[in-house]
Amino acid sequence: MPAEGSCTRDWEGFGEVEAGSLLMIGHVKMAAFSIEATRELFLKGLGSADRDPLEIGRTQLRLEKVAGSLDADTSTWPGQMYVWVENLQSTWQNCRTLETSLGSEVVESAVCCHDERAADALVLRDPGTVNALVVNQAPKGYADALRKAMGKSDKSNLVCLMDLLFLVPKGVSAQLGSFYQRFLSALVTKSNDGYRLHFGAGDFLRQSFTFQDESDESQDLWRDSSQEVCFYVDSEAKFRIAFSKFSKAGLVAADWKAVESAGEFSFDKCVDANGSTILELKHVIRSPTHPECPIQSESPLDSTLMGA
C-alpha cells in the first residue's frame, strides 16, 4: 500500500465513513522466531507503548513463538503491515541504533525525496518475524486527534495500523472479496494492490485489509494455524446477521446465546459460492459491544466514532 501520510501537511480529517465499512481491525496474530526481538523493534525502534500484547495504535499484535532462528529468510506473515508514526525521523534514528544492538538489519530502505538526511518513508524488516513494515509519518495533528477521539492518554510514537496486506493463492483475491461482501455485508473495493476490505470509525480512524494474489515470484510463503485476524463489525445488528449467515453455511458451530454472551465468534476458512474452501485463515468476528473493543458504547464520543 502506498504511503498516504505526509511529513508536511496538517491533519484535516477523513470525512464520512463509507457505507459498508467494518469498524476496525482488533488484532493480528502471527508466528515469531523471537518474540523478544520483535518487541525490541516495536518498543525501541517504533516507539510503541510497553504492553503485552503489543499495540499498533489500538490494534493488537499477538505473537506465537515458533522454532527457528533470527537468520531465517521466510517471513511469518505472507504480506506486510503499513503503519503511521508521529515522528518518522526519530523512528529512523532509533531503528539504525537498534541494528547495532541486535546485530541484524532493521532498516531495509529509506525513501528520501527532498533531503537524504530526512526520510519520507521507511521499509523495515522485523528481525523477530522477518516481516516487512512500511512506515510513514502521520499528518500533523493526527496522533493527538486520534488519542482524544479514542480516549487514549499515552504518547506512543506508533500511531496506527493503516493497512494489513495478505498474499493469497493465485485467483483467490476476487473470490475472497465476494466472501466478505456476502457474509459480512462489507465494503470491498478493487485497487492496484488487489482487493481491499474497508474499516472506519468516525472522522479519525481508517484501516484496510488488502488481499492480493501471489505473483509468479512468490516462493515458500509461510502459512500456518498461528495466523489470525480479528475484525470488529460496526453494529450489533450486523454482528447478528453475520453470525446467522456463517451458521447457515456451516462455518460456525456455536449457538447464538453463547455467541451473544461472548460478543464474538470465529471461523477457520473462507469459502466460495459453492461452499468450497478458498482460503484457510482463522478469523475472529466481534461485536462493537465486546469488552475489549477500543471504541466503547459508553464513550461520550461513541456516536461520532460509529459514524452516526
Image: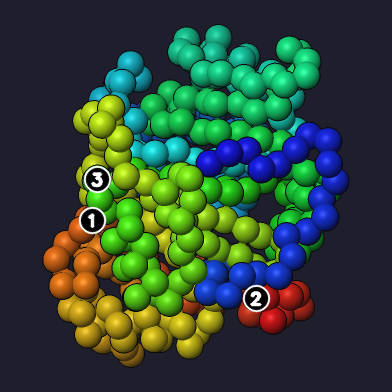
Task: Residue under label 2, please give it.
Answer: 306
Dot label at residue 170: 3
How crowded is the residue under tag 3: few (<14 C-alpha within 10 Å), some, or many (20+)?
few
Whether label 3 touches label 2, CB < 8 Å: no
Picture coordinates of residue 71 (x, y %)?
Answer: 33, 16
Residue at disc 1, secondary structure: strand
Task: Tell me what residue is drawn at x 42 percent, y 49 percent.
Answer: 194
Question: In the rendered structure, which disc, 1 or 3, sits on the residue that comes first in sequence?
Answer: 3
Q: Amino acid at mark 1?
A: Leu
Picture coordinates of residue 81 (x, y %)?
Answer: 49, 40
Q: Is 28 situated above or below 184? A: above
Name the side, left or right, on which 117 lies relative to 185.
right
Picture coordinates of residue 282 (x, y %)?
Answer: 29, 58
Q: Is 156 situated above or below 248? A: above
> Which dot, 1 or 3, sits closer to the camera?
3
Real-space CA distance between mark 2 and mark 1, rounded to the nearest whole angstrom: 30 Å
Q: Amino acid at mark 3?
A: Lys
Task: Residue under label 1, please give it.
Answer: 279
Picture coordinates of residue 271 (x, y %)?
Answer: 22, 66
